[in-house]
Amino acid sequence: MSDLTKTPRELDIEVRRPHFDLSSDLKEDWFDGSAFKTAFENGFSLLFPIGEKAFIESVRNFENDVSDPKLLKEIKAFYGQEAAHRKVHQQYNETLCQMRGYDLELLTKPQVERHRNRYSQLSPFQRLAATVAAEHLTAILADDLMKNKDHFADQGKSIAKLWYWHALEESEHKAVAFDVYMHVGGTLKGRRKALILATFFILKDTFRSMFIMLKKDGQLWKIRTWIDGINFLFLKPGILRRILIPWMKFFNKDFHPWDLNNMDSIDYWKKQIPQKSTT
C-alpha cells in the first residue's frame, strides 16, 4: 500500500450501477412486517441524497492536494460509489413517498435548511471532518449489517439487496475521506467534535422522519411499535448497542478505519451482489 492510504492493496473499490425495483417492497412494512424497523430504515434512506452530495464535494475541495496515485484512484471510485448511492436513494425516497403518501419535502426539510444555512458556512476542513465522521458511522453500521446475514427477514426482497449493496460499498471506501483528511492536516480534535455532531444530527433527522411516517401510518402511539423499536435498537438485535464500541474507537488518537479489517465480509458480499462494474 502507499504511504497515504491503508486500504488493503488487494481491494479494488468498484463503481457499480445497480437497479432495484422497489415499488412492491416500499408500499408495505417490508422489514419483517414491523412498522418501527421499516420506518427506521426508510428514515435512514432519506439522509443520503443530500449527504452523499456533501461528501463528494468535501473531498473534492482537497483533491488537488493529493498526488499519491493509489489514493487518487480511490478518490475517483469514492465519487462514483457515492454518486450511485445518491441516485438510488433519491429513487427510493421518491418511490416511498409516492407509494405511502408521505411528504418528501416535509421529511427532508431540516436537512435542506441546515445544509443551506449552517453547513454552507463551515470551512472546507470542517466539511471534510463532517464527512469523515459520517463515513465512520455508516461504515460501522455497514459492517454490522454485513456480518449479520439474516438481518432482514427476507433477503430476496429488492430492498434488502439495496441495503447490502450500500453496506458493501461503504465498507470498500470507508477510509478514503479519512486518509484525505489526515494527509491535508486534519486534527484529532476536529474529527472528534465532528463525530459527536454527525451522530446527533443523523439520529435526530432519522427519528424525526420516523415519527412523521409512523404518525401518518397510525402506528406512532401503539405500545407494540415501541416495544419492537426498543428491542431492535438496544436489546435484541440491538443495532445501536452493538456499534457503541466501534463508534468509540474513532476517538482514539491512532484510529484508522481499517483497524477493523472486514475483508472477509466484503469478499462474501461481492459474490452475493454481482453488479456490473464501470471502473
Image (cartoon, rainbow, N blue to C red):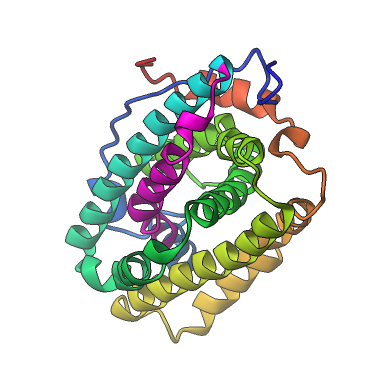
Q: Please name whichever residue, 5 or 241, is drawn nearer the observer in this view of the structure.
A: 5
Q: Is residue 63 magenta?
A: yes
Q: Which residues are magenta?
A: 42-68
Q: Residue at x 60, y 17 (%)?
A: 11
Q: Residue at x 49, y 19 (%)?
A: 73
Q: How many marks?
A: 0
Residue 157: quadrant of the picture: top left
The answer to whether residue 222 is left or right of residue 145 is: left
Kindly tell me whether residue 57 is visible in this rendering: yes
* Residue 117: percent from left, percent from top: 34, 71
Q: Is residue 140 magenta?
A: no
* Residue 118: percent from left, percent from top: 40, 70
* Residue 254: percent from left, percent from top: 82, 43
**The C terminus sits in image quarter:** top left
Query: Mainly helix, strand or loop, the magenta region?
Result: helix
Q: Residue at x 58, y 43 (%)?
A: 142
The answer to whether residue 88 is left or right of residue 246 is: left
161 versus 223 height, above or below: above
Q: Please name whichever residue, 220 or 183, is drawn nearer the observer in this view of the structure.
A: 183
82 versus 70 height, above or below: below
**The N terminus sits in image quarter:** top right
The answer to whether residue 140 is left or right of residue 26 is: right
Residue 264: quadrant of the picture: top right
89 versus 203 height, above or below: above
Residue 17: quadrant of the picture: top left
Q: Please name whichever residue, 87 or 180, is drawn nearer the observer in this view of the structure.
A: 180
272 versus 203 height, above or below: above
Kindly tell me whether residue 155 is visible in this rendering: no
